[in-house]
């Protein structure tokens, strides 16, 4: 999951969750963001208790749709992390099997005292998984004689044929379209009004998961910035009555072009959407009962994306790891969300440097998948990194963004720390373990790791330039950065977890940012260290012979 479970000392305060009494119904996404902030004296509105009888099913299925079991290549070798593979794989069912398994498949099952639950290769807040994946693929041997729209069913490692086109080829050759959607009810069931934030962070993690899976095959993942929500909804059938139960609405997030060779993405979706196709299947119901969260419905309406122009191209760059890299498949399948850190392990300066480089704009293969200019700076709480003094550091990620942030901050001049190819600005020297813990809703995991990070978005300027949709894409960028940290930490033999519970304005006060201004906002926390394993949990294979009988 992309956010750690709350520790015992914060569970009691969370039972007193209530909205800010001064907050009215949000009039725009800034109002939603303000209303859903956590603070030491109050938490964003959530359920008074968890109704386990209404817990949403984590797996979307389309009953009546043709199911195509995908080959499982979990025993096959993969290129060295982070890739890409030196030669692009041919687009066939075997390659699709590896792609979908590494991007969205199961990594393991966990069992404890009679309860069993799945873990996935794409992390999610609370392991609730609002994100669904669909693909439009030309006619392909073993898949379909004509082009089709498919839904990926991770527990079966299978594609469900949601729609069958009349034409054999509906896309340009050399690639396919990957659409990601969200079911907010899955998150709102547990997290209430703040759940909309988590859906967007999960989408960002999913972008990174897809980009890394593509690299394992020598493919490239590029998020398409121009399509509107309406176009994506029509493309994957979210506008149809059989797409979801009315209280479990599924909403369009984004569209990715997976280039399998030199194939270029379609310039427009018009012809694909208008093409003749026959629909199949009906979505399963996820819960027997539902609680309404009107503020999330407002946020969904406020952040609707129209057709937009394509951002300017920027150069990308590859990172060569300064440690012995394991195979991509091992890294992806071994990644877990740590629940506790040991407070002892230290990270080498070289590995820390690699991880910072992996978060920079244009870093292949993950961050490069996003086409938008960088909108996030990283505030590091460094605890145990060899050769780097404990303290508070700023990674600007973009010179202009960093200059504007430092102008907005109050405080003394910074000290530049060169790590070799990447520079940190030191804001404060000395232990910041208590601060990291306090700002992350009192969760010790933020202070017991090697470092923690708060992701500071250039909020006001980005929304003013791009509209309220930018709220979503800033969170996608944060999730994408988090996925890069997850995978690089795992590759280096460490552990990580995202932290969605944090005291927004307390972090702003630490930086000297005015409480009543929204030029910059904290939108995600993360931590890296050495996990303490829970020996009570039994780990079972992701796809046993009984669950998945189709291996190559």
Image (tube, helix red, strand yellow):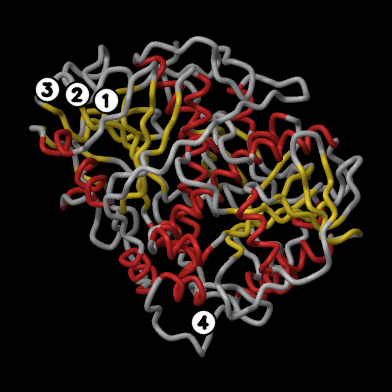
User: Circle 3 sits on which residue?
Assistant: 167
What residue do we see at 16% from left, 20% from top?
Answer: 146
- Compared across the picture, whether 261 is left or right of 506 comes to left
N-terminal label among 2 and 4: 4
Query: Can you tell which of label 4 and label 1 is closer to the viewer?
Result: 1
Q: Specify the label residue 147 is tagged with.
A: 2
N-terminal label among 2 and 1: 1
Q: Local crowd at mark 4 within 10 Å, few (<14), some, or many (≥20)?
A: some
What residue do we see at 23% from left, 60% from top?
Answer: 246
Real-space Cα separation, disc 3 to disc 4, in angstroms: 52 Å
Do residues under tags 4 and 1 come within 8 Å of each other at their CB atoms?
A: no
N-terminal label among 3 and 4: 4
N-terminal label among 1 and 3: 1
What residue do we see at 30% from left, 41% from top?
Answer: 61
Q: Local crowd at mark 2 within 10 Å, few (<14), some, or many (≥20)?
A: many
Do residues under tags 3 and 4 come within 8 Å of each other at their CB atoms?
A: no
Q: Local crowd at mark 3 within 10 Å, few (<14), some, or many (≥20)?
A: some
Examine the rendered structure and indicate whether residue 272 appears above or below residue 305.
above
Whether residue 185 is visible, yes or no, is: no
Do residues under tags 2 and 4 come within 8 Å of each other at their CB atoms?
A: no
Whether residue 140 is visible, yes or no, is: yes
The image quadrant of residue 273 is: top left
Real-space Cα separation, disc 2 to disc 1, in angstroms: 6 Å
User: Circle 4 sits on which residue?
Assistant: 19
Residue 222 point in image, percent of width and height: 42, 33
SS type, badge 4: loop
Examine the rendered structure and indicate whether residue 350 appears above or below residue 92.
below
Real-space Cα separation, disc 4 to disc 1, in angstroms: 45 Å
The image quadrant of residue 534 is: top right
């Amino acid at each position: 999951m992309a956010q750690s479970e709350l520790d015992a000392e914060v569970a009691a305060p969370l039972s007193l969750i209530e909205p800010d009494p001064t907050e009215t119904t949000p009039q725009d996404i800034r109002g939603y963001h303000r209303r859903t902030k956590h603070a030491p004296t109050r938490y964003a509105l959530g359920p008074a208790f968890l109704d386990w009888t209404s817990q949403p099913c984590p797996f979307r299925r389309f009953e009546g749709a043709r199911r195509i079991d995908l080959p499982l290549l979990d025993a096959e070798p993969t290129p060295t992390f982070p890739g890409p593979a030196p030669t692009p794989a041919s687009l066939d069912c075997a390659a699709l099997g590896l792609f979908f398994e590494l991007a969205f498949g199961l990594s393991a099952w966990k069992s404890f005292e009679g309860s069993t639950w799945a873990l996935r290769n794409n992390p999610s807040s609370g392991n609730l998984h609002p994100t669904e994946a669909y693909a439009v693929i030309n006619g392909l041997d073993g898949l379909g004689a004509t082009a089709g729209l498919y839904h990926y069913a991770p527990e079966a490692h299978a594609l469900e044929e949601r729609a069958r086109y009349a034409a054999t080829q509906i896309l340009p050759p050399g690639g396919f379209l990957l659409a990601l959607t969200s079911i907010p009810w899955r998150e709102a069931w547990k997290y209430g009004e703040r759940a909309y934030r988590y859906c967007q962070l999960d989408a960002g993690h999913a972008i990174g998961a897809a980009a890394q899976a593509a690299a394992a095959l020598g493919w490239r993942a590029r998020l398409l910035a121009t399509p509107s929500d309406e176009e994506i909804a029509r493309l994957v059938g979210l506008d149809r009555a059989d797409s979801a139960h009315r209280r479990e609405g599924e909403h369009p997030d984004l569209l990715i072009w997976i280039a399998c060779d030199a194939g270029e993405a379609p310039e427009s979706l018009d012809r694909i959407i208008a093409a003749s196709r026959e629909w199949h299947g009906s979505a399963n119901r996820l819960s027997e009962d539902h609680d309404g969260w009107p503020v999330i419905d407002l946020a969904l309406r406020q952040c609707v994306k129209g057709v937009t122009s394509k951002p300017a191209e920027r150069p990308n760059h590859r990172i060569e790891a300064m440690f012995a890299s394991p195979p991509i498949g091992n890294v992806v399948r071994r990644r877990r969300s740590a629940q506790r850190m040991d407070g002892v392990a230290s990270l080498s300066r070289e590995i820390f440097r690699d991880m910072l480089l992996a978060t920079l704009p244009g870093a292949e293969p993950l961050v490069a998948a996003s086409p938008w200019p960088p909108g996030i700076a990283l505030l590091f709480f460094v605890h145990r990194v060899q050769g780097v003094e404990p303290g508070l550091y700023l990674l600007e990620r973009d010179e202009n963004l960093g200059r504007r942030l430092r102008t907005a901050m109050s405080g003394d001049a910074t000290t530049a720390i060169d790590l070799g190819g990447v520079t940190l600005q030191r804001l404060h020297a000395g232990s910041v373990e208590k601060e990291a813990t306090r700002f992350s809703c009192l969760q010790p995991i933020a202070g017991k790791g090697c470092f923690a990070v708060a992701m500071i978005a250039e909020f006001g300027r980005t929304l003013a330039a791009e509209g309220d949709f930018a709220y979503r894409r800033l969170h996608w960028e944060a999730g994408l950065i988090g996925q890069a940290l997850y995978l690089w930490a795992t590759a280096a033999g460490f552990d990580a977890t995202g932290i969605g519970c944090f005291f927004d304005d307390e972090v702003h006060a630490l930086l000297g940012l005015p409480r009543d201004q929204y030029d910059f906002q904290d939108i995600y926390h993360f931590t890296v260290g050495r996990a303490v394993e829970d020996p009570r949990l039994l780990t079972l294979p992701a796809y046993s012979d009984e669950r998945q009988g189709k291996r190559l």
